[in-house]
Image (cartoon, helix red, strand yellow):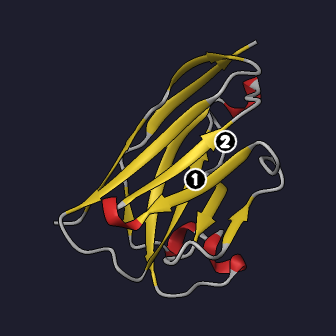
Amino acid sequence: QAQLAESGGGLVQAGGSLRLSCAASGRAFNGYAMGWFRRAPEKEREFVAAISWSGGRTHHADSVKGRFTISRDNAKNTVFLQMNSLKPEDTAVYYCAAMYGRPTAQDMGVPKDYDYWGQGTQVTVSS
């Protein structure tokens, strides 16, 4: 059973930083692109960032560019989301997801194209 487990969420003041991790287990995730999405209360799920299997291609939403950085360590089956200069509007449940293949940047932003999802981790940014 493939599983994705997020960690690293919490409560932080505006301007602070958090680093989310997503550990993959249960199967080999060779060849999988990984993405981060978030859902704020009463809002639609929103694409945050994605990274190709090799790590050579990344894609970040305009709302987080320059503040968030996605990376991965394939030896540890883990993907990271470094979040700096956090704002109250970043408050949401953050989910990681895995998609097999070599998606385009556009594909990376489509939730339904992902094969596996984690349970999410809460990030709360206070003003």
**How far apart are the two marked residues, 1 and 2, measured between alpha carbons?**
12 Å
Q: Position of residue 109 (x, y in %)?
A: 66, 68
User: For the point 77% across and 21% down, which residue is it?
Assistant: 15
Q: Position of residue 98 (x, y in %)?
A: 43, 68
- The image quadrant where one finds the N terminus is bottom left
Q: Secondary structure at mark 2?
A: loop
Q: Horizontally, is 3 left or right of 43 in the view?
A: left
Residue closest to the eye, 110 or 126: 126
Q: Kindly check if marks 1 and 2 are in contact, taking CB atoms under 8 A apart as contact.
A: no
Q: Residue furthest bottom?
A: 102
Q: Position of residue 91 (x, y in %)?
A: 64, 29
Residue closest to the eye, 54 or 111: 54
- The image quadrant where one finds the C terminus is top right
Image vertical order of residue 101 relative to residue 99, above or below: below
**Comes first in the chain, label 1 or label 2:** 1
Q: Position of residue 33 (x, y in %)?
A: 50, 74
Question: Label 2: few (<14), some or many (≥20) within 10 Å?
Answer: few
Question: Label 1: few (<14), some or many (≥20) within 10 Å?
Answer: many
User: For the point 67% across and 68% down, which residue is it?
Assistant: 58
- For label 2, the residue is 43
Q: Residue furthest front?
A: 75
Q: Give the quarter of the image for residue 116.
A: bottom left
- For label 1, the residue is 37
Q: Horizontally, is 4 left or right of 125 in the view?
A: left
User: For the point 39% across and 67% down, which residue is it?
Assistant: 74
User: For the point 44% across and 33% down, which residue is it?
Assistant: 8
| Front tag of 1 and 2 | 1
